[in-house]
Amino acid sequence: MHKILVLAAAGSVLLGVTGSNAAELLSPPAAPAAKTAAVTTSAPPSGVSQVPAKGPPILLEAGKGTLIRLPRPAATVFIANPDVADVQVKSPAMIYVNAKTPGETVLYAVDADDNVLLNAPIRVEHDVSRLRQSLHALIPGENVAVESVDGSLVLKGNVSTAGRAEKANALAASIANETKGKVVNQLSVATPN
């Protein structure tokens, strides 16, 4: 019992000597909570600035491309997602963007002084112009509209028979399969009274 009292007395003396340091050791630290709040914010570190894509997107159909003329020569040209589109530098001030699969990405061009020349969003859609032409040739006179939405081909409108609706769906499916997309068939079949 005597040893326990001596240890207790020694502990109280130690606490008395350290003063406020003991209170800091016994209380939970407040700094990590403030640090956690700072980590969850989305602001970049000081001195760092983000260059987001701006302007209307460059719309392309899969398998097609476009030539882009830059205002001055670029030192670096790159694309965020090369699975969606690819970029080829034809000259320091001219680049070619080739659309691969439906989706979205961003194209950047930077000059030798790290000035951003281009930071444009790229949106690649299915080849709907080819599908529209094929639909008009295969089922002429039908009211079929085609849209590319989130990697899918959407068929809308009215057709005269179920057979024609099936032909339209099969044609859309063949084009959608080229880019691993799917078809959403919203066609209505007109039935006689």
Image (cartoon, grey):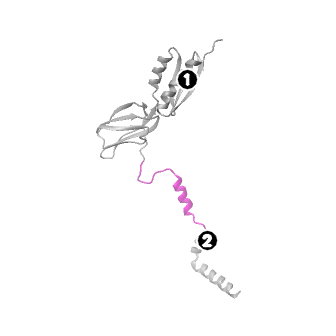
Secondary structure at badge 1 equals strand
In the rendered view, does 107 fall on the left or right side of 4? Answer: left
In depth, the one of 51 and 135 nearer the eye is 135
- Counting the numbered discs, the total is 2
Q: Depth-wise, is mark 2 or mark 1 nearer the camera?
A: 1
In depth, the one of 63 and 106 nearer the eye is 63
Label 2 vs 1, first from the N-terminus: 2
Quadrant where the N terminus is found in the figure: bottom right
Which contiguous range is marked in magenta?
27-49
Which mark is drawn over residue 60? none
Above or below: residue 74 compared with residue 144? below
- Residue 112 spot, x, y in % from top left: 29, 46
Q: Which residue is mark 2?
A: 26
In depth, the one of 105 and 191 nearer the eye is 191
| Disc 2 to disc 1: CB gap under 8 Å | no
- Residue at 49%, 27% in the rendered image: 174
Q: Which residue is mark 1?
A: 156
Q: Callout 2 environment at 10 Å: few (<14), some (14 to 19), or many (20+)?
A: few
In the rendered view, does 110 fall on the left or right side of 172? Answer: left
- Residue 71 spot, x, y in % from top left: 31, 36
Quadrant where the C terminus is found in the figure: top right
Residue 67, quarter of the rendered image = top left
As drawn, the residue found furthest toward the bottom would be 2
